[in-house]
Image (cartoon, grey):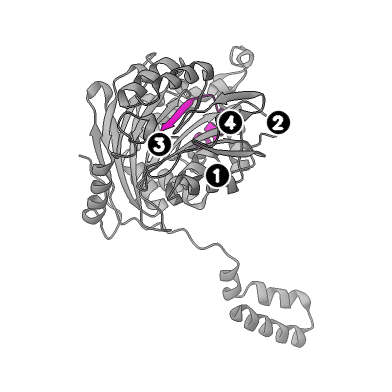
Amino acid sequence: MLTFRNTCLCAMCGLLALGCGTVANTLVMKNPKVEKILSDPPMDRTVTHTGHVEYVGDDDNRITVLYVTGTPYEMGYEHGLLLAAQVRETIKDVQVGADKLLPKILRDSKMISVRDEEQIVNEFLDRAWKMMARYAPKEDLEEMEGLAAGSGIPLDVIHRMHALPDVGETSCSGLVAKGSATQDGHVYQLRILDYGANFNLQRRPLITVYRPTTGNANAYVTIGWIGFVGAVSGVSEKGVALSEMGYGNPPGETLAGTPMPFMLKNVLRYADTAEDGAAIIRATRRTNSYVYFLGDRHNDPIGMVTSAQRCLAYHANESEELKVDNQTMPQFRDIVYGGHYEDKQEKLVREMQGKIDVSAIQDLARQIAMKSNLQTVIYDLTADKIWVANRKDNVRAADRPYVEFSLVDGWGKAEAFAATNAVPAPVALSKR
């Protein structure tokens, strides 16, 4: 680099004149041009969009819809500022639920106080996040910092919440069906999340419509909860959708990798096809063992069985059986699937071939969701629609009414809000 070479020449002259290597080192390393070369670029903390909040569903089953635009920091800031009170409530519920990370014998002990328990959990999550933070995408680190700034919640508290999915994964269920497997030829996808009920996340469900303005990223939607900026369910404007489930505890699991919810955010941001998404997952330094189902509006769906060491990808119509470890799963035309109650799901999917639609998938979800079922999402990737059901009290999400959300309307509103809500400086954001 020319600038660095010229600076070194100046330092060499100083070395010859002064006869001192230490002085020469200082001349080079403290030169403003060299410091700029060797420093990370500063984070862009400019906020020039306001974001927007709407609601879908009725009072008993209402979901907040958040539209955010801009840089990662800016989108996190919009989330935090618009929904600050709810973010704080989510954090409180998660802190209470995180107590379940402790062994029951310790939770029931009279020897330690509630404050002691909280300190133990916080230290554990802080250390877990420290292991993962090195591998977290820059976009998500910046979005979390924006969320903290907008909501007024300390950044380390935000980090703890986002460490939880990788330290407490559990089994879930999923399915992608297309073409001959469906009643109308549409591409349908199911995502059953059977985890997180002890955190009371269902109290503040959220659909976030992202419209990034940097990094050539896709617009995309995540289906989650207020205060959480990872992705465990989502779909991009390119018609690529996600389902995931934990898969046992094989040797070699580690936290020294990219947090799963942020790896999946990268799939939504940068994958134009399911193949692209599989390549992103394959290339990522992974943590624990997960199964992923990648739906694609235009191409065959892909299933993936992964861990820190293993990454097995398989396509619909690739073989009649899938053999993983000591298990064999029959495969059906134009379908990838898997779940906690594997044998039961296999039988039901076999019977559903050629008849799959939204109603059939809702019935399937009711039969295979676990008692811990927190959220169920159904995608029609052909029609650009999703249906979301959330748990209430002890009623599983799969047994609750679904709320329909039009992705076509979501993409259009996101673009319109981005154009009309731009402002020259941070402002007090409004709700509708």
Percent from the top left, x then y, of residue 32?
57, 74
Disc 4 residue type (three-letter): Val
Residue at the spot 54% in from the left edge and 22% down from the top edge: 99
Q: Earlier in the sequence, mark 3 or mark 2?
A: 3
Q: Earlier in the sequence, mark 1 or mark 4?
A: 4
| In this rendering, position of residue 331 left or right of residue 268 | right
- Residue at the spot of label 3: 227
Q: Secondary structure at mark 4?
A: helix
User: Which mark, residue 251?
Assistant: 2
Quadrant housing residue 361: top left
Badge 1: how crowded within 10 Å, few (<14), some, or many (20+)?
many
Disc 1 residue type (three-letter): Ile
Mark 4, mark 2: which one is toward the viewer? 2
Q: Earlier in the sequence, mark 2 or mark 1?
A: 2
Disc 2 residue type (three-letter): Pro
Residue at the spot 44% in from the left edge and 22% down from the top edge: 349
Disc 3 residue type (three-letter): Gly
**Highlighted magenta segment, given as a residue range:** 160-178
- Residue at the spot of label 4: 167
User: Which mark, residue 368?
Assistant: none
Q: Does the segment drawn in magenta span residue 181? A: no
Quadrant housing residue 324: top right
Kindly tell me whether residue 188 is visible in this rendering. Answer: no
User: Which mark, residue 281?
Assistant: 1
Choose between 130 and 305: the one closer to the eye. 305
Percent from the top left, x then y, of residue 366?
39, 16
- Please state, as top left, top right, bottom left or bottom right, where the N terminus lies in the image: bottom right
